[in-house]
Image (spheres, helix red, strand yellow):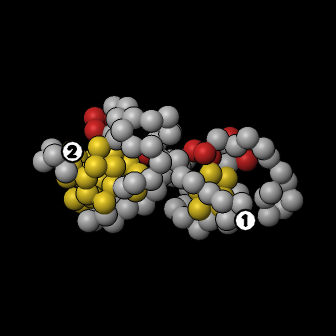
Amino acid sequence: AYDDGDKESKVKALLIKAAGRGSAGGGGEAAGAASFAEGDKIEARHGGGRRWFPGKIAAVHGDGTYDIAYDDGDKESKVKALLIKAAGRGSAGGGGEAAGAASFAEGDKIEARHGGGRRWFP
């Protein structure tokens, strides 16, 4: 349920984020995008492919992209946040989880894009 009392069911995970994270209220952040810091252990979809590969955040850019140093020695620059997730989260290795999707439990404070719109609502 939204703070204003509205209710919505079967909301796609990419339309939900933790409350207070990113630019709520329609600030243009991509749905489901997470924030990472240099050194964070992550998994990313190399080249935008389907499979997730382990690595670390090597650099954070002001445009919301990241440089990745993969565990196998490969590197990639300017990777969009929607292609990155925290290490060990979900089904790594190409499972069915949507990129950037997070897991929430009943009662968690979240924000969602009501009706799939552009604005985030608490």
Question: Residue at label 2?
Answer: 76
In the rendered structure, which amino acid carries the disc numbered 1? Gly
Secondary structure state at the residue bearing disc 1:
loop
Work out whether residue 64 can be spotted. Answer: no
Which residue is found at the position 28% from the left and 49% from the top?
Answer: 54
Above or below for 113 versus 46: below
State which quarter of the image contains the N terminus. Answer: bottom right
Which residue is found at the position 54% from the left and 64% from the top?
Answer: 21
Q: Is residue 69 left or right of residue 103?
A: left
* The furthest residue to the left: 73
Q: Is residue 34 left or right of residue 45?
A: right
Q: Is residue 26 left or right of residue 46?
A: right
Q: Earlier in the sequence, mark 1 or mark 2?
A: 2
Which mark, by number, is residue 37? none
Q: Nearer the viewer, mark 1 or mark 2?
A: 1
Distance between the Cα atoms at labels 1 and 2? 37 Å
Above or below for 81 versus 109: above
Which mark, by number, is residue 107? 1
Q: Quadrant of residue 94?
A: top left
In the rendered structure, which amino acid carries the disc numbered 2? Glu
Above or below for 46 versus 120: above
Which residue is found at the position 33% from the left and 31% from the top?
Answer: 49
Q: Position of residue 116 (x, y in %)?
A: 68, 41
